[in-house]
Image: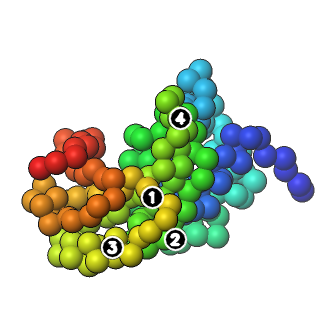
Amino acid sequence: MRYTLTQDQEYILSVLKETKSMRKSQAFSLLNKLDSEKQESYAARCLNQLRHMRKIAWQTDELFTLSPLWAVPADAEMLAAVDIMLDLTDIKIHALSASTQPFKLCFLSEQHSGSGNYAVTVVRPGTEVSINYALRSIHGDIHTVIFLLQNISQAKEIQTSLPHFFALFDNGKYHYFSEV
């Protein structure tokens, strides 16, 4: 049987193809940014229909993935990068890529004031020097780099001339800052 996807379902799947997994709350946030009138129950219906069409599979009550990847554990760093992407997007994600090292996730988002081109880099303790080195070779298309830190002291170790800021998860939400 052939199913027709709605634009919202296609949008969710386009993001999911890059991120590989998402939380139900992230899918709702994606749709809610497009239209603030959309309720959480609408997002749940979209996801249930995608599951019924075998486009997605639930890994837990809150976490889903593309159906062929149902047995692959979710990438916690990618889920964090998606949270940051959603924090920095006012309206819509126009493009994203999860395959450009040293970045975990690159995205072009529509803002109320224009658009933003971002790249999230996860900074694990001890990787600061290798990240600095990898960023030196970045030329051309300049992103604003968001360094996702595990502790505040890591910010002192990051050295780049690219536009950037730092993100730190604390007390259930991300805090963003430009200097330490």
Residue that appears at 35% across and 63% down: 121
**Of callouts 1 and 2, the N-terminal one:** 2
Residue that appears at 89% across and 56% down: 1
Dot 2 corresponds to which residue?
99
Measure how far apart labels 4 and 1 are at the Cα level: 16 Å
Above or below residue 171? Residue 168 is below
- Whether the residues at callouts 4 and 1 have beta carbons within 8 Å, the answer is no
Residue that appears at 65% across and 53% down: 13
Callout 1: 10 Å neighbours few (<14), some, many (20+)?
A: few
Q: Secondary structure at mark 2?
A: loop
Q: Identify which residue, 33 or 103, lies in the foreground.
A: 103
45 with respect to 23 (left or right): right
Residue 174, how many percent across, how many down?
27, 44
Q: Secondary structure at mark 1?
A: loop
Q: Amino acid at mark 2?
A: Ser
Indicate which disc residue 24 carries.
none
**Of callouts 3 and 2, the N-terminal one:** 2
Furthest toward the top, the residue is 37
